[in-house]
Image (spheres, helix red, strand yellow):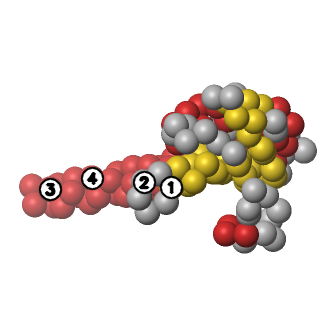
Amino acid sequence: MSKKDDIIEINLEEKIQKEKRNKQNFRKGFQEKRQKLQAFFNDRKRNDNRIPGAIVDITNLHYSVTNDELKELAQQFGKVIRAQVEWDKMGRSQEQGFIEFFYVSDAKKAVETLNNTTIESLPMKAQLRDSTMKRGMFKR
């Protein structure tokens, strides 16, 4: 064998090794994604009564309540996707808002606790939004 044949053989071996590493990295990435999905579904199985996605409508809010304060208030009941106070075009509070929870069971706990709770001397009303109800339909 000559030097040229040795170099070609070494290059071929390097390419084979690179392909093996690429396949291993691909498998590793796939396995990590699979483990994350499996952990998510196992979490869902452990909490059978936790159906994903629920919105709680809040009315009679004090005008000084902000989005952050509403979210902070809601986080004690469970995982919150978002909390929002509704504002008019002039930037004034419309004294109503909503909290979107990750699980229905957390939303139900929040409704039970927050309904008729006073904030800044105003008793706020909490109501679980019906999934068929359109966003603009809720009135206090």
Q: Position of residue 62 (x, y in %)?
A: 61, 39
Which residue: 22% across, 53% down? 10
Neighbor class of circle 2 (other Cα within 10 Å; few <14, some 14-19, many 20+) is few
Give the CA separation, mark 1 to mark 2. 6 Å
In the picture of the structure, the residue carrying the numbered disc 4 is: 14
Q: Which secondary structure, mark 3?
A: helix
Q: Are marks 1 and 2 in contact (CB under 8 Å)?
A: yes
**Label 1 – label 3 distance at C-alpha:** 72 Å
- Residue situated furthest left in the rendering: 3
Q: Is residue 124 above or below residue 14?
A: above
For label 2, the residue is 91
Residue 122 image point, x, y percent? 70, 35
Mark 3–mark 4 Cα distance, whole angstroms, equals 10 Å
Give the residue at x 80% y 65%: 131
Name of the residue lying farthest toward the right: 49
Q: Which residue is mark 1?
A: 87
Residue at the image position 77 percent from the left and 31 percent from the top: 117
The image position of residue 76, as x and y in percent, is 70, 28
Q: Secondary structure at mark 2?
A: loop
Quadrant (top left, top right, bottom left, bottom right) of the C terminus: bottom right
**Mark 4 surroundings: few (<14), some (14-19) or many (≥20) residues within 10 A:** few
43 on left or right of 62 = right
Specify the amino acid type for callout 4: Glu
**Which is closer to the viewer, label 4 or label 2?**
2
Query: How many callouts does the rendering have?
Result: 4
